[in-house]
Amino acid sequence: MSRGTLEKRAGLRPKQEAGPSGVVGTKRWLASAMFLPAILYIFALIGLPFLLACIYSLSDIKVGSVGYHFIGLANFRSVLESPSFRRSLGNSFIFTISSQILVLVGSTILSLALKERFRGRGFVRFLMLLPWVAPISLGAIGWKWILDSLYSVINWVLLAMHLVRPFDTPMWLGEPRLAMMSVILVHTWRLLPFSTVILLAGLTAIPKDIPEAAAVDGAGFWRTLFQITIPMMLPIVNVAILFGIIFTFTDMTVVYILTRGGPYDSTQVLPSLAFFSGILGGDLAEGAAISMFLVPLLVIVAWAMLRSAHRAEVT
Amino acid sequence: MRGPVSMRKVAASVAHWTVVVVFSVLLAFPFYWMLITMFKRTGDLYNLQNNPFIFNQKPTLDHLRLLFNDTLYLRWMWNTALVGAIVVAITLALALPAAYALARLTGRWGQRLGIGIFLTYLVPPTLLFIPLSRVVSLLGLQDSIWSLVVVYPSFTVPFSTWLLMGFFKSIPRELEDAAMVDGLTRFGAFVKLVIPVSLSGILTVVIFSFTLVTQEFVYALTFISSEAHQMLGVGVPIFLVRGDVYYWGSLMAACLIASVPTAFLYNLFLDRFISGFTVGAVK
């Protein structure tokens, strides 16, 4: 993290604005010319579509319709009354919260284990990173094969261990409860590596002498863990959780590939429901209204990130 | 005293290796399973009596042959590579000057604007794909990879700008100051001095943007309808499935072949990506 240190320091030096290259005024046009293209692009492809999404959600626009009318909050009202939507809203939270808890526990354990150098660490790191770096749609289809209704390798193992009876094996993606568990499992599997490497970055940034001093003072592994390591890790854990929440809550790929939201909407989430009604169903307005329900959580996460970035700037 | 201490050491070592092995197996298992599946004969794959962990019949290359000869897999690879290359070029053209300007030329205000750009990375495709699908069809780009070329930089530019900002800040200002005293303009110093010493940062952004393009799913699924124009990430899971028939052997081969190079590249630059994600929480 030495580069992180440098950039923070560079950002903090107050004299940078008055140095010989401090370019207040004269070179401002150059600065603008250099960053405006990026800002305009981002505005055109994120800002404007976001505004359009807001407008659509208040209208009756359909795929292929020429114009549209404003119909106020009617979309939101009808969406809120639909059982599919309520189910999806609940699922989105269930999937996000439970997978984040599992990710947090798993990545804490794994990052502590990977902290010290050992033989084969590089290879282990490559293996454990695969779920995060491989395209998620391809990882999910791999799971679809592992969880196959007939040829699931998990069922074969369960059968071999006599834990289930032949012809009565679990339908991992076919029963509501099991399907929900499977989706949570795949989300956890995918985000665990990401969270682990972020926590590792935090662990290696803890100055070595602090735990050593604690050991000299007689603190054992658990005391060091709970009184030194975990408190010092909180800011970085925060970052891992915030990104994890966003990546899970706004993802439709896992659900789309594994279950298409089924059986009976039992694994439907907000983004996949928006896709099914907005794109496949052609009701752009309703789809936009559904995806609008992602916004409050995104705002909260963005606010939390700003706060932690600000704190890093001040201290 | 020596006894208990070494006992504790052994216990710690056992715990350590148990954790490492269990997690590696759990995380890498689907990829191992892809590898096994892609070389198994069809008769071996679909026989419930067979032990799935071993080859009950001789391994075969049939699934690979089917994948490369009878599907559009290579075409999807080409599409992905092409879109990836163009998106990387657009990303660099937009993010390099922006990151430099925000790092150097605008002081504290630049830092705030930089964080603002970073936050737009948090706006997910699943919020924007509905209006963008309409925009894409108004532009006449539906079912064309150009729709992806236009839209993908919207998620590569914010993060790349953020990463490069951090990188430029770590270059000492004296470098450009000296050059400007010697008569170079600010922009000249940026092009002739800063970019050459930032090559590793630029390479990081190239890899990062390219892997993001290969990982994308939602936009490609929404904008592209015909099989021939598809990207790898959508083509494999959607179009390799005919009706309800899954060709698991070829499917798993397609997944593994597309995943491993991406993973390998990403792994090389991992530490830099992470420093971008941690937003100053690590110091």
Image (cartoon, rainbow, N blue to C red):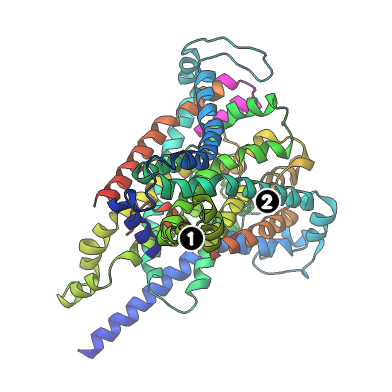
Q: Which mark is residue A39?
A: none
Q: Is residue B216 visible in the rendered structure shown here? A: yes
* Residue B128 located within the stretch drawn in magenta: no
Of the residues under marks 2 and 1, which one precedes in the sequence?
2
The mark closer to the camera, 2 or 1, is: 1
Q: Are marks 2 and 1 on the same chain?
A: yes
Q: Give the labeled residue for mark 1.
A: B182
Residue range corresponding to the magenta coloring: A269-285
Other residues around mark 2 within 10 Å, as few (<14) / some (14–19) / many (≥20): some
- Name the quadrant containing residue B200: bottom right
Q: Amino acid at mark 1?
A: Asp
Q: Position of residue B278 (x, y in %)?
A: 39, 53
Q: Position of residue B190 (x, y in %)?
A: 52, 54
Q: Position of residue B276 (x, y in %)?
A: 44, 54
Tell me: residue A262, above or below residue A143: above
- Report the chain holding disc 1: B
Task: Kindly identify the residue that appears in the image at 57 percent across and 57 percent down.
Answer: A154
Q: Amino acid at mark 2?
A: Ala
* Residue A273 located within the stretch drawn in magenta: yes
Mark 1 falls on what kind of element? loop
Task: Kindly identify the residue that appears in the image at 26 percent across and 63 percent down.
Answer: A229
Task: Kindly identify the residue that appears in the image at 76 percent across and 41 percent down.
Answer: B229
For residue B283, side relative to residue A256 (left or right): left
Name the magenta segment's main secondary structure.
Answer: helix
On the rendered image, what quadrant is the C terminus of chain B found in? bottom left
Q: Is residue B47 visible in the rendered structure shown here? A: no
Q: Give the labeled residue for mark 2.
A: B85
Q: Spatial distance from mark 2 to mark 1, Cα to Cα?
A: 36 Å
Q: Position of residue B5 (x, y in %)?
A: 25, 84
